[in-house]
Image: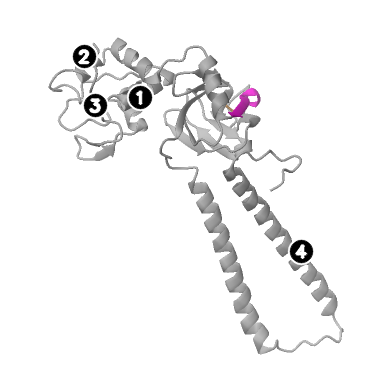
Amino acid sequence: MRHFIFFPPEASEYARHIDWIYFGLIGISVIIVGLVVVLMVSFGIRYRRGSPAVRGRLPEWVSRDVEIGWTVGTLFAFVFIFWFAAATFITTIGATPNALEIHVVGKQWMWKIEHPNGVREINELHVPVNVPVRLVMISQDVIHSFFLPALRIKQDVLPGRYTSESFTADKTGIYNLFCAEYCGTDHARMGGRIDIMTKPDYQKWLDAQPGAHNLAEKGRQLFARLGCAGCHFEKGHTRAPDLAGVYGSYVRLADGRTVRADEAYLRDSILQPARDIVAGYQPIMPSFKGTVSEDQIFDLVAFIKSYSGSGEVIK
Ligand code: CUA
């Protein structure tokens, strides 16, 4: 669809679909409202009091065939619209394998962004074109909302819980980034830009950034510094569960439930260790609430995700 004035550009397949739905629904509404107005006015004139218009029963084919026809027709039209909209929306949820995972921390009043190799930026998001990207987001204080108009995606960023949004941009360029949830004095300034780059440009940009460490490596160092290794890397694992390969696995808990060890589970286990005790263990782990920041939790989770049990054990 063409790019309208006063309308943000479309930088993904998804954005084009959303616009089709948006303009499609408006178009249908305009046609129906127009039809109703025309019929109202013309019937008002035609059947005015004293006019010679015929007022008897309608012919059989009108009251049956036409009735059935438009009911079935509109039903199919709207089921089609529902299918198209639902199928479009589903592409933004759920994990795409091999997606580039970028972490976003919202705080009053800025966006802190971290790339898989540890490169950080503020109020700017550099991404490669034609690569599926998954943003994993959390807030350090109040509710914010990460809004990328050119990609037609907007997702609340909550304190205490990860949310995510996925997209695959297919047009390079620099587009707006906004906070779309009123979050205090400088809410209106809490924005920036997304820079969609070609793959080689993105790589060049990444290489030119200072502080590129492997996220998992940073997490590993933090893990050692916080003393986690004392229990989690102990031989025999009598005090704490083995973390090798835990990410993505199913964990049996002391209360009989089985949960999947995803990012949210790992985060909860660091901050509220007494909540989901793994079967066979005592609730002896202290909470790290207030000790580690949301950025550091991302690092720790990255380390746990990458840890397979091989390599040297850190103390
Ligand atoms: Cu953050 Cu509005």
What residue would you read off at disc 4? 34
Front residue (pair 65, 196): 196
Residue 138 appears in the figure: no
Please identify, in this view, whether the residue under mark 1 or under mark 3 is nearer the observer: 3
The quadrant of the picture showing ligand 1 is top right
Q: Is mark 3 within 8 Å of ligand 1?
A: no
| For residue 266, above or below residue 230 | below
* Residue 175 coordinates in the image, percent (x, y): 65, 31
Magenta span: chief secondary structure:
strand
* Secondary structure at numbered mark 3: loop
Please identify, in this view, whether the residue under mark 2 or under mark 3 is nearer the observer: 3
Which quarter of the figure has residue 233? top left
Front residue (pair 219, 32): 219
What residue would you read off at disc 2? 230
What residue would you read off at disc 1? 301
* Residue 107 coordinates in the image, percent (x, y): 52, 22
Which quarter of the figure has residue 67? bottom right
Q: Is mark 1 within 8 Å of ligand 1?
A: no
* Badge 4 vs badge 3, beta-carbon distance below 8 Å: no
* Badge 2 vs badge 3, beta-carbon distance below 8 Å: no
In the rendered structure, which amino acid carries the disc numbered 2? Gly
Q: CA distance from mark 4 to mark 3?
A: 65 Å
Stretch in magenta: 187-197
Residue 244 — which label? 3
* Secondary structure at numbered mark 1: helix
Image check: 229 left or right of 290?
left
Front residue (pair 192, 258): 192
Please identify, in this view, whether the residue under mark 4 or under mark 3 is nearer the observer: 3
In the rendered structure, which amino acid carries the disc numbered 3? Ala
Q: If you read the primary sequence from the N terminus, does the residue marked by circle 2 or circle 3 appear first?
A: 2
Q: CA distance from mark 4 to mark 1?
A: 56 Å
